[in-house]
Amino acid sequence: MKLTLKMKVREKTKWKIQALRRAMETFRDAVNDWIDVAWKHKIADRTLHEIAYKELRQKYRNLYSNSLQDAMNWAIQIVKTELKLNPNKKPEFKTLMISFKNVDFKFENNGFVIPLNGKRVYVPVYVPKKYYKWLVNGKFGRLYFKEEDGEIYAYLTVKVEDKPVYEPKSWFGVDLGVHNLAVVADERGRKILRFDGEIVNRYKELLEKERARRQKRQMKEFNNKEHKYGCKHRSFSRYVNHVVSKEIVRKAKEYKACIVLEKLRGVKRRGARKPKRVRKLLHRWSYHDLIQKIKYKAKLEGVPVIEISPRNTSKTCSNCGFVYKRFKDQRLFHCPKCGIIIDRDLNASINIARKGREEYKKRAFLSALKSEASSPQWL
Ligand SMILES: [Zn+2]
């Protein structure tokens, strides 16, 4: 699978940072020039190279030739999408970045050696410990430098070997966020994990207080701070999602379980009848990010993942199978048929686990049928 490793550039030497910044500005200008050409000719493919490469090579003599070609690739992608979405307005590339092909850079001594202004320049980065195994064994793809909030980051794409996926012995249904952040249960009805929304609540209250204080003071750059508040929330939710997904995948691996997720369209907006405070909070939670993190960590660990339709998972009684159509996502599921009272999220996650087991077996059966049908012994 392909990973993208993000590493912050160490601002050790000023001239290097300045040179890098200048190169990024040049790259951006070059992308915009390629866009001009593409837009003028209404062409969004590699024939652009024949039309304008020589001319742009003259103009951007300081830019590494492969980077100039990559600028063209970026322009092609941008123009392609814009011609479909917004054919009347020429797009503009605003991101401050530059990209290098894998043959053009080297990773050594916790830094990248890249071509800048005709020289090889060593740019040191902060390397998180967990990256080392991929930096040593992985196959490098492209390297980008990109500016974000005034800092420069290196993004390295790495291809790593997938671990073989095991045959599951159990199924873990994951229910995301109505009253809890995540509840995990298996197909036998055992509760495996529960991450409550309490930690989120507490954090949110803290942020609200902070915001109220700021509003009182009527700070001048309020809008600016407002932006930062959003960022803060985002990075916090990413961190919590990291912890939650890591634990779910670890537990699944321990039990040789298959993780069962609901296929969600965008953000899940179930549970519209909760108190407003909770509703606002949970809707801001990045479930998409959590799902992506679970999938990606599972893939790295060789943990199987299956997605099922969310239809009736919260309305079905996990004890007797009755579908309680009028159930409105209260905290407790009270089955009118068998009388059981069970936590809503737990009930849903058990149903998800069972649906996952069904789906898994169905798919395994179908693929076995397929391979038998195509094997020569049947001919
Ligand atoms: Zn029941």
Image (cartoon, rainbow, N blue to C red):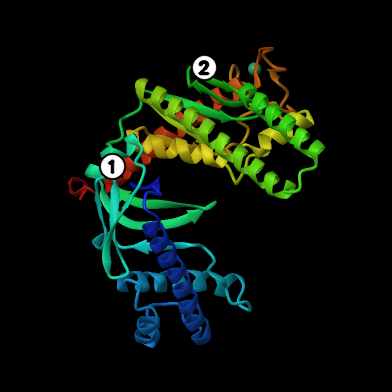
Label 1, on which residue?
134
Q: Farthest residue in the left direction? A: 377
Left or right of 34 on screen, residue 122: left
279 and 125: which is toward the camera:
125
Q: Any atom of ligand 1 within 8 Å of the CB at mark 1?
A: no
Q: Is residue 48 above or below residue 178?
A: below
Between marks 1 and 2 in the image, the one whose residue lies nearer the viewer:
1
Left or right of 12 on screen, residue 236: right
For the residue marked with disc 1, what is the amino acid?
Answer: Trp
Residue 108 lies, in percent from the top left, at: 23, 49
Q: Residue 189, labelled with which disc?
A: 2
Q: Residue at x 35, y 21 (%)?
A: 254
Q: Helix, strand or loop at disc 1?
A: helix
Residue 149 visible somewhere in the drawing? yes
The answer to whether marks 1 and 2 mark residues whose Cβ atoms lie closer than 8 Å is: no
216 and 192: which is toward the camera:
216
Residue 327 lies, in percent from the top left, at: 73, 27
Q: Residues within 10 Å of mark 1 (few under 14, many from 20)?
A: some
Q: Residue at x 32, y 71 (%)?
A: 64
Marks counted in the figure total 2
Q: Is residue 164 above or below residue 254?
A: below
Residue 53 lies, in percent from the top left, at: 36, 83
